[in-house]
Image: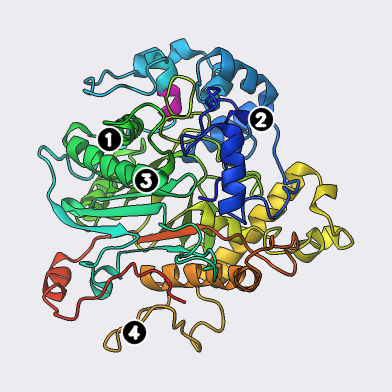
Amino acid sequence: MEDPASNPSSHPGSPSLGVSENGLSNSHDSAKMEAENPLASSRQPVRSATTTPIENKSEVNHVKQHASESSLFSSGTHVMPSWAAQMNQEHNNTPYIILQLQRTMDIKKLEKKSRKYKQDDFPDIFGNLDNESRNLLFWHFPPIKFAKKHKKKLQIFDTVTGPYDPKFVDEIYTPWVFGRAISTYPHLPTKDSRDGDPICDSYCIQLLEENITITVVADGCNWGPRPMAASNAAKAAFTDYLRNHIPDMSDLRDVGHYLLQALSACHSKIVEGKDQWEAGTTTLLGGMLIPVKPLKDKDSKDKKEKKDKKEKKDKKELTHWVWAFVSIGDCKSYHYSPSSKKVEDLTEGNRQNVFDAKDCGGRLGPQAEDGGPDLRNVSVHYKMCEPGDIVLILSDGVHDNLDPQTLGKTPADVSSEYNSVQDWGLVPADTAQTLKTDYMLKLLSDDLICGGKEEAKLRTKVFSVSSQMEEPLMSPGSITTRIIQFCLNMTGKGREWMEQNPQDKLPNDYAKYPGKMDHATCVTMRVGKFDTHLANSSSKKSDLRSSTRNIKD
């Protein structure tokens, strides 16, 4: 994550102790970041679309309807409203989605649905919340049962990590999962290494028994060893915690609880053995892809017999899946359905202003006044999936490069309704957000996931592909490579200009120098059973290659 963090106290939940990510005073840190990171202040913030908080009954009903699947949010609830900002200060860093729901729901109705769980041996970052308020974060998760109850700790089929894992073989897991983490920053001739090194993004994909996948992307905030350490500590703690507690889960609502607790495990690991303000911070998006039982509907006896037979077949073939995840910060997850040919942004609205690198909305690590995390935009989501569906996790270094404004496009370029408007600031905020989202989803669907018209003719050469195995157009490996290549292409002109003009700031002209340079991570999962026999036989190959090589000049 590009995060100049020149003034961490500029938003609720940030420390007011004059200490920044690097352990420096705010004023010194600002000068240091501007000197070390020419991208930090090379472009002035541009007005970006925001949405308005829910204030009337009809909108509240829309939220409840929308929350039945995918997410507790509708498009109008992610931005911190003014009343929530004030209450956030008064309520000790409470996630603002809880403050929103407390205004619209009778919490007492949730008491019967509340569940008791064992207390973990590390501090609960949500400890200031009562049990009912905490459950608001995942109250919309239905109690869908797992396809199979797991009474013991599941064995790890394999672990795929990045940004660099020399033991991972490209060909083995391409049919199911794939990940890349790179840097799109320039390598200035006056420096020995690329700007922004080391890469502070990281990811981990654990393939477990019974076709369960745990996946996490962590985006360290700022540059340097501290955010990199925070990112890596968080991804390890997240996957370990969830795997250890799978035997304690029986349905989707249990998953919601343990996803939140996994964040507490991550924060504890980040600060473990460090002074309060010595640890780095990181955003995170991670979850579980799980086969589940079909939903049961009330029906007649005759239809029930037919449905029972169908359910037995579905159970054997694992036709129902769910992607359940937690998010803090500005990473995003998308879902693509081959049957409908549509892409859905499962985290819509969590990244409003792509030009403000100082505020990612929330983060793990010491950021609040008491050394706790910034919990403002914590959210828990789920999405029902079918075999063959595609799930993406993107760090902001990727999805910011899908935003039409970052790509130098005007409202006139993306909408005939605004064919004479060249300035995004002249478009109503909610309309601008809708136009941008529609553009990003179409770009993902038509070009980056499905491959576009030219993909079959012109294969990318950035990452080598085995001559013995031509990857399918929509395999996780092909999709990930296309998305990463797109980010490299979009940031290429700006990167080249900076390498040729190392003492100057990049001009604030997105039409001429499109894209946003950053650490960029893409993880792609294909929903369905994975073939353990295929992987086991493939792993015996001798020509092992790294799947997470960084781009070299």
Q: What residue do we see at 62% from left, 56% from top? A: 39
Give x and y (percent) for residue 42.
68, 55
Q: In this view, does 514 lie to the left or right of 334?
A: right
* 286 lies above or below 168: above
Q: Is residue 442 above or below residue 259?
A: below
Q: In this view, does 327 lie to the left or right of 272?
A: right
Q: In which quarter of the image is residue 412?
A: bottom right
Q: How far apart are marks 2 and 3 (CA)?
A: 37 Å
Query: In the rendered structure, which amino acid carries the disc numbered 3?
Result: Ser
Q: Could you give the CA–CA distance between mark 3 and mark 4, rounded to whole angstroms? A: 33 Å
For marks 4 and 2, the one nearer the N-term is 2
* Callout 1 touching callout 4 (CB < 8 Å): no
Q: What element carries label 2?
A: helix
Question: Number of labelled discs?
Answer: 4
Q: Distance between the residues labelled 3 and 1?
A: 29 Å
Tag on residue 59? 2
Q: Distance between the residues labelled 1 and 4?
A: 39 Å
Q: Which colour scheme is used?
A: rainbow
Secondary structure of the residue carrying tag 4 is loop
Give the spatial CA distance, label 4 vs label 2. Answer: 49 Å
Q: Regarding mark 3 in the picture, which secondary structure is present there?
A: helix
Mark carried by residue 470: 4
Q: Which of marks 3 and 1 is in front?
A: 3
Earlier in the chain: of badge 2 and badge 1, it is: 2
Label 1 belongs to which residue? Answer: 251
> Range of the magenta residues?
135-139
Q: Which residue is drawn at 36% across and 42% down?
A: 230
